[in-house]
Amino acid sequence: MEMTLRWYGPGHDTISLEQIRQIPGVTGVITTLYDKMPGEVWTREEIRNLKNYVEEHGLNLSGIESVNVHDSIKIGSEDRDQYIDAYIETLKNLGEEGIHLVCYNFMPVFDWTRTELARVLEDGSTALAYNQETVDNMNPEKMFESIASDMNGTVMPGWEPERMEKIKELFALYKDVDAEKLFDNLVYFLERIMPVCNEYDINMAIHPDDPAWPIFGLPRIINSKEGIQRVMKAVDNPHNGVTFCAGSYGTNLKNDLPEMIRSLPGRIHFAHVRNLKFNSITPLDFEEAPHPSQCGTFDMYEIVKALHDINFDGPIRPDHGRMIWNEVGMPGYGLYDRALGATYILGLWEAIDKNEKRG
Ligand SMILES: [Mn+2]
């Protein structure tokens, strides 16, 4: 296991690599070429520059989150092969530059959805939150406006203005894509990219849908144990793997997170560990809680234990943190609360590890 933090790159992130390096136990970052549009090839030079920059700051570039998948691939349009070819070229270039982990998602239109980016919690900190009633009373355009006005002047991944300008068009393109078609399109994509993943030992790690159910009538397939197992079996290659995101799968309380982890030995290449606090089931309402078990609904010990039990050896990162201590930054991606999360997870890991070795 390697403890990492997500970082958006120079000029995009509100926190610096110097700061990340001072978080005890964090040795790497998960980053991306933020300006790249889906379908655009990442050149070796661009990748090398990013990697050198991270390494010059004393950190590893532990993986990419994300290389985004073009909508044509998800929709299965006639031009999908040209976009898959570009994706393959990017993977090859990443492999040539020694990068072996790529997180991606296969969600139509929206990467993730929250109804509030700065809900004030009891202790005065703010966190991202979700209320189903609010979503049910909103249309997608309004959803975008509400998210965009709440980003502290930053641009949240998945909610880029140029993408959202085309939101009606996007919805029209997904009109005939149901869950089965989306699944078939994912399998088609994976089968085409597996040879380059084999050649360069690149672990693909699909991020689950967040929240873990269909919203605005769009299909979602990576949201349960059955859903993810189906994808693993359809393309039964260890390079076809998973980003286990506790906070995304965990939005559906029917998902038994430790059990899901145990059902995926050798296939979890990347882990996002975060806690949620459910305030109400009907209507569903939850917020992103501080990482410790006592602050939310999940038993974080059991989640980390399950990862340890399957000998998880990839990068792990604390997921979204709250805004605390007057920090102003990208919602969910501030410094302080994620740093607390990283050290907490490291503490759990050390205790579990030593306990086990003592038998
Ligand atoms: Mn995640």
Image (cartoon, grey):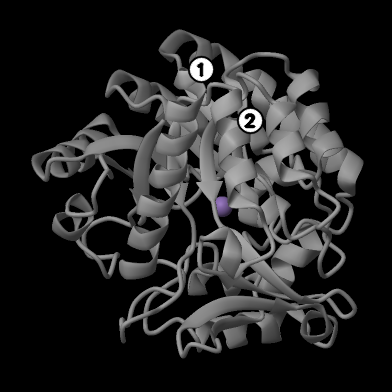
Q: In which quadrant of the rendered view does residue 159 lie? A: bottom right
Check mark 1 vs ligand 1: CB closer than 8 Å? yes or no.
Answer: no
Residue pushed farthest front? 358
Residues 41 and 3: in front is: 3
Question: Is disc 1 placed on a helix, strand or loop?
Answer: helix
Instruction: Quote the CA–CA distance across marks 1 and 2.
Output: 17 Å
Which residue is found at the position 13% from the left and 40% from the top? Answer: 58
Pointer 1: what residue?
Answer: 197
Q: Earlier in the sequence, mark 1 or mark 2?
A: 2
Residue 305 place in picture, x, y as percent:
58, 35
Q: Is residue 133 left or right of residue 244?
A: right
Numbered circle sitting on residue 81: 2
The relative height of residue 248 versus residue 180 in the rendered view (above or below) is below
Numbered circle sitting on residue 30: none
Which numbered disc, 1 or 2, marks the residue closer to the eye?
A: 1
Q: Is residue 314 left or right of residue 243?
A: left
The relative height of residue 16 versus residue 63 in the rendered view (above or below) is below
